[in-house]
Image: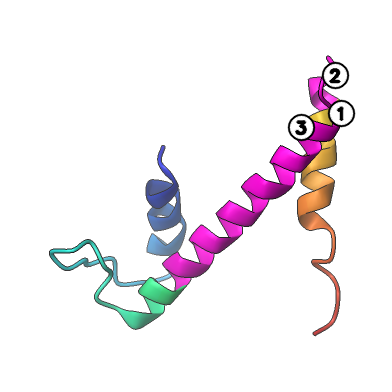
Amino acid sequence: MSSREAFEKLVADRLFVLTRDERGVYTSFATHLSWEMWKAATKRAEEICQNEMDEQHGSSNAWYAARSCRDAIREGNNDSC
C-alpha cells in the first residue's frame, strides 16, 4: 500500500473529500492540508528511523532497532504546546 493509499484509507472514515483535480491536488482544503501534514510526518519519521539505523549499523538486532525507531518517533508527542 502506498503512502497516499494509507492516508486515503485513514481519512475516508472521517468524511474527508478525496476528490483530486487534474494535477492530483485535493480539491478540499482540509484534505489537502491533512495530506501535506501526512507527508511531512512521514518524511520526519523516515529521517528518525534512518538515524536509528545509522546508529545501529552492524547490529543484527532488528527488533531493538525497530523499537528504538518507534520510541524516537514518539519522543515529544506528549509535550504541551
Residue furthest out toward the left: 22
Can you tell which mark lies on residue 19?
A: none
Up the image or down, 38 lies above or below 29; here it is above
Can you tell which mark lies on residue 61?
A: 2
Label 1 neighbourhood size at 10 Å, few (<14), some (14-19), many (20+)?
few
Please report whichever mark, 2 or 3, sits nearer to the chain's N-terminal start: 3
Would residue 4 be found to the left or right of residue 21 on screen?
A: right
**Region of the chain picked out in magenta, as a range:** 34-63
C-alpha span from label 2 to label 3? 11 Å
Which secondary structure lies at badge 3?
helix
In front: 44, or 79?
44
Q: For residue 43: magenta?
A: yes
Residue denoted by label 1: 64
In front: 69, or 19?
69
Q: Residue at x 85, y 33 (%)?
A: 55
Marks 2,3: beta carbons within 8 A: no
Q: Residue at x 24, y 76 (%)?
A: 27
Would residue 1 be found to the left or right of residue 65 on screen?
A: left
The picture quadrant where one finds residue 74 is: bottom right
Q: Residue at x 80, y 38 (%)?
A: 52
Label 3 neighbourhood size at 10 Å, few (<14), some (14-19), many (20+)?
some
Three-letter code for the amino acid on which mark 3 is drawn:
Met
Q: Main secondary structure of the magenta part?
A: helix
The picture quadrant where one finds residue 54 is: top right
Up the image or down, 6 lies above or below 81; here it is above
Marks 3,1: beta carbons within 8 A: no
Marks 2,1: beta carbons within 8 A: yes
Up the image or down, 58 lies above or below 46; here it is above
Report x, y in % for residue 81. Answer: 80, 85
Residue denoted by label 3: 53
Three-letter code for the amino acid on which mark 2 is drawn:
Asn
**Which corner quadrant holds the N terminus?**
top left
